[in-house]
Image (spheres, rainbow, N blue to C red):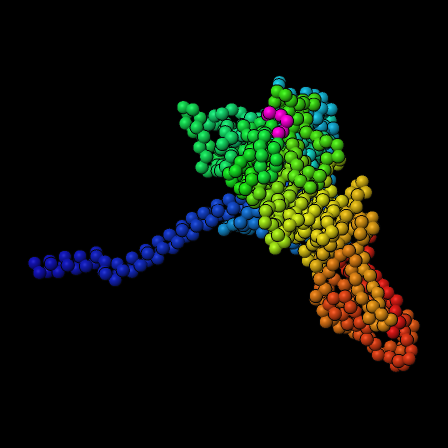
Amino acid sequence: MLWGRMIINKFNRRNAMSLIELIVAIAIMSTVLISILTAMTAQLSMLSRGKEMTVGSFDNQSEVEKAIEYVESNDKFSSGDFKEILEYCKKLPNREDKEIGITGIGSGSVKLYMVSMLNDTKRTVVYLSPALASDEKYTVNLEAKNVDIFVNNDSTKKVALITGTPPKVTGKYTISGSNYYKSIYKWYASIPGIIEPQWPNDYEQIIRSVKDTELNKEATVELPDLKNYTNRYVMFSAQPTDGNGIRGTEVSSPKSVLIQGAEWRVGNFPWGDKNSNSVYDGFAVDKDVQLTYSMIDGNLDYNMLSVPIGDTGTTDIKNSSLFVPRELDGRNKYRSSIYGNVNTGNIYEKDIFTSKSIDWNVQKAIHFANKIISDNAPIKIKTTDGQIVMYRFVEIDSSGKPKLNAGVPKLKEPSAGFKFENMYNPNRKYTNLGSEISTLDDVYLGAYGIGKGFIYLHPFSSINAKNILLEAEEPITIYNSALALETLHGDDNTMNRQIILKSVKDISIKNNHGYTSSYIQGNSNTKSVIAFDTDKNISIENAIFKDIDINLLSNAVLKGVSWDFGNTLAVKDGKVLTLSKMPDGTKIKNEGNLYLGATGGLKFTDRIEEVLTKPVKIELNYPSADYSKIIINTVNYKRDLSMESGFEDIVEKGNWKNLGTSGSSLEYKIDLINNVANITSMKIKFDGHNELKLEVNKYNNSVNTKYKLYIRDKYIKDKDNNILEASIDGEI
C-alpha cells in the first residue's frame, strides 16, 4: 500500500505545474497580451487621429477656399490694395494671415500673403500673390457676353413694379470660346437703405448657382421670389468655367434694376419685419408684428417686448427689423423749446413728439422715416445685428397716398435756394424734407453686426442735440444732411460739446450733385468739436463746418469743404490729409486754422492755389539787418515744432538735413555761393518756435560769403509730389 501511494504521488507530481512555472507562464502571457493590446490601442488611436486630421483638413480647406474665392473675385486682387481685402475675409479664432517677402522669382522680389488655418489636428497653408497671378501663363479661352437684366423681356426697364401683377426679372447671357464646361451665375441685391448703391461695394450676393448651357446660345435665368428684395436694387453676373475647372472673368450686367414694392414710408403704424423682406406681410406670429405709437414713444427692447395678438397669444420682435413710417398717430402741430407752433401742412404727416427718453434696442435693422422731437430727454437708438437708416420723405397726396412717377414714389424736393445754414441761422426753422432726431439732451445711434452694422443718412436728414455720438461696426455714410449741437440756457466757453463719428470701417460725408451742402454746426457758446474716429478712411465733400473744431484721426480726403475763422481742422500725427476741389471747381475755404501736429501729412490733387482759397506756404525773413537770424513762418497752417527745441547742428553744405530729430517735419539745406574757402565751419541753431540762427567761423572775418537757405516741410506735397519749400538769400 505504501508503495502504491508513492507511485500515485509521483504520478501526480509529474502532471502538475509548479508555482514557479505558473508565474513564468502568466508573465509570458501578460507580455504578449500587453503587446497586442498596445498595438490595438495605438492602431485605434491612429485611426481616430487620422479621422480628426481628415475632418480638420477638410474644414480648413473649406475656410481657405472661401478666402481664396473672395480674394479672386475682388477687383483689387491685382492692385496695390490687395493686402487690404484680406481683412474682409471671414476671421476665425484659428485663422492666421501675414505678409511674406521673398526674392528670386521672376525679375525680382514678390510679396506672398499667407492664409493659414490651424486647429487641434491640422494646419493648412495657402500662399497668395497678385504678382505671380498676373504672370500666370494659363488663360481661359471663354467669355461671357451680352450679360444683362430684363424686366418682362425688356432690357430698357430699370424698375420692376411688384405692387400689381409681379413681372419677370431675368438675367441673360451668352458664352463663347472653347473647352467649355459650365457657367456660374449670380444674383446680387443692394444693402437695404442705400439710395444710390455702388457696384460692387454696396451689394451682397443672394443667389449663386451652376448652369449647363450651350456655347453661343443665349441662356436665361429668372430671379425668384421678388418680394424678398422689395425696394432694393439687383444685379446679375455670369462666369464661364472650362474643362479644367478654371474660371473665366465674371461679367456683371451694365445696369441694376429696382424691385419697387409698396412704399412703407407712408404707413400709419410702426412694425417689426420678421422675414427681412421690407414688406409688412400681416399681423401674425409667424409673420410681421404691428406696433402701436405708444410702444415707440419711450423704451423698445426686443428682449422684453410682448405684443398681444387677440386670442392666439402674444408675439415679440426678436430677429426683426423696425420700420417707423411717416403717418403715425403722432403730432403735426405743437409748441416746444426746439420749435414754435409747427404745422406740417398735411394731416397725414405726424412727428413723434415726446417728453420721455427714447431707448430703442432692436435686434436687426432700424429704418426710420419720421421725426423725433424731444425737449429735454436723451435719445438712444441701437441695433445688435443691423443697420440704422434715416430716410428722405416721399410726397404724399391729399388722401395720404404716395405720389408716383412711373410707378416710383416721388421724393420731396427742397425749395429753390434751400440751404441748411439758413435753416439754423439766426433761428431754428422746421424742415419737412427728411428724417430728424432732435432733443436738448444727448443722442446716441449705435449700429452693430459685422457686414450689417452701418449708419446711413439720406439727403435732408438731421440730428440735433446737446452731444451726438454715432457708432458703427460698418461704414458711416451721410448724404447732404445736418448735424448740430443745440444751444442751452447757461452754456459758456468753459463747457465742452462734441459730435463723435466712430466706426470700425470708413466714415464719409458725401454729396449728391445739385443738393445743398452738408452742414455741421457747433454750439457757439461752448467749446465744440467733431471727431472722425476710425482707423480706416475718412472722406468729406461739400460740407460746411461752423463754430466747431474738426479732428481727423485717420487718413482723410476733403473736397469743397469749409470751416470758420477761429476754428481748427487738426490732423493726427502720422496721418495724411488729401485736399481737392469739387468737380465744379469749388475750392476748400480754409478760413480757420489747419493744424498738422508734428508729423501730419498734407497732399493736393491739383496745384495748391487751385485747391485752397488761402494757400499754405512757408515764409522766411530777417528780423533785422543781421542776416545770421532767420524767422520761419508757416502760413495758413501750423506745426508742433517742440521736438526741434534747442536744436543745434553742424551744417553740411548742399545737403538736406532734419531741422531737429528724425521725426521733425522741417528740413533745411544751405548752399554757399561765393568765398566758400573762407568758411572753416558753420552751425545752425533753432529755438523750437520760429527763430533760426547761423553761426560761422571764417579765416578772414572781413570777407563775407553769400548763401541761400532752403526750408521745406517734408510732409506737405503737391500733385506732382513736390515738397513744399521756401528759400531766402543772405550774406554772412
Residue 567 position within the rendered picture, expressed as x and y whole percent measured from the top left: 70, 52
Residue displayed at 74% across by 28% down: 146
Q: Place residue 544 in its image quadrant.
A: top right
Q: Is residue 106 visible?
A: no
Q: Position of residue 103 (x, y in %)?
A: 71, 57
Q: Position of residue 69 (x, y in %)?
A: 63, 41
What secondary structure is the stretch in magenta mostly built from? loop
Towards the viewer: 33 or 720: 720
At x 49%, y 51%, the residue is 120
Rendered residue at 50%/48% (across/down):
53
- The residue depicted at 71 percent of the width and 39 percent of the height is 422
Where are the magenta residues, as a range? 343-348
Please, is residue 674 above or below residue 537 in the view?
below
Residue 147 visible in the picture: yes
The C terminus - image quarter: bottom right
- Whole-percent x and y of residue 707? 88, 70
For residue 509, side relative to residue 64 (left or right): right
Nearest the eye: 438 or 656: 438
Report the quarter where the N terminus lies. bottom left
